[in-house]
Amino acid sequence: MGSQMSRESTSPAARQESVEMAERLEASACPLPGSARSQAVYNVYNQRIDPSACPKMDPRNNMPVEPNQQPFPGQRRYISTEREASTIPKGGTETTWVYPSPQMFYNALKRKGKGDDVTEDDMSAVVFAHNTMNEVTWQHVLAWEALHAGECADPQLLRFTGRPDELSPLARLSSWFGNQLPFDRHDWWVDRCGQEVRYVIDFYFHEHAAGTPEAFTLRVRPAIDSAQSVVDRSKMSIYKTFARLGLPCPVTGTAGHIGKTAVHAEQQ
């Protein structure tokens, strides 16, 4: 009987059944739309990741284990590990980007040597300001993307990176005329239905308005990586100028919603 069972277990039919069962188990353990498996997906560190790889799960809450949620060495008080989902669609997925928790943010600041002037008690407010700025930034991006609504109705944020030590050409030019420098710069790559479009964002802090919504302002525009971006900048400049003057769109002769939306985003 033993030899018979051994021969049956190694038969082609049995091996095929085992392979199919393993595939079903793998699919049920880490379900993911087939279309997403071939798309580029990036994490918050601008690193490309494998979307089909199953994360290590914590059985206590069925959530991915986050090593960077651990208290930082020398930390004296508890910091929240709760994460908030953004409204920003994440490229290559059917979900939105998730903001870092206060603990993750604190750890990142400490690792970069930028956390000397913040305490554990500050982190909830810091993360709230960070999240709010990103939501406002996305509204600016959507205002620009409205120029291409006919070809892509649902743009997504594919990836991003911080470049605080690199001045954008516009920021450098502006400083030559005595204007203040931004405290941070980001580059965001938007997935315009298959086309990657880079945006440059300069963030400014106004000390005289500290503690008010006017303390932070930003400049968002598509990077001049293509002729289309140059055309978009020219169009948007005209649309916003006419919207501020209360005049109809110079092209269609009707009230232009693109310019109004862009101006409204700047006023947030």
Image: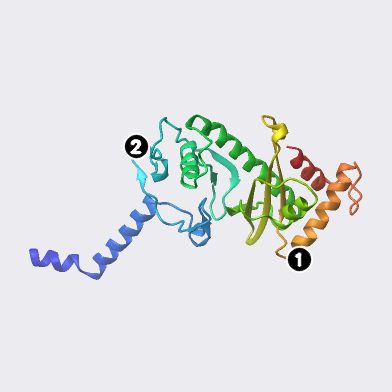
Q: Position of residue 193 (x, y in %)?
A: 64, 58
Closest to the observer: 229 or 111?
A: 111
Crowdedness of circle 2 by 10 Å Cα count: few (<14), some, many (20+)?
few
Look at 39% across and 50% down and name the residue there: 55
Q: Position of residue 61 (x, y in %)?
A: 38, 37
- The image shows residue 263, relative to residue 10, as above or below, that is above
Whether residue 238 sits left or right of residue 41 in the image: it is right
Q: What colouring style does the render use?
A: rainbow
- The CA span between labels 2 and 1 is 52 Å
Judged from the image, the secondary structure of the residue bearing numbered disc 1 is helix
Amino acid tagged 1: Ala
Judged from the image, the secondary structure of the residue bearing numbered disc 2 is loop
Q: Is residue 68 visible in this depiction of the protein?
A: yes
Closest to the observer: 91 or 18?
A: 91
- The image shows residue 201, relative to residue 73, as above or below, that is below
Amino acid tagged 2: Arg
**Closer mark to the observer between disc 2 and disc 1:** 1
Question: Which label was assigned to residue 227?
Answer: 1
Q: Position of residue 230 (x, y in %)?
A: 78, 61
Q: How many marks?
A: 2
- Which residue is identified by label 2? 60
**Quadrant of image for the C terminus:** top right
Question: Which label was assigned to residue 26?
Answer: none
**Quadrant of image for the N terminus:** bottom left
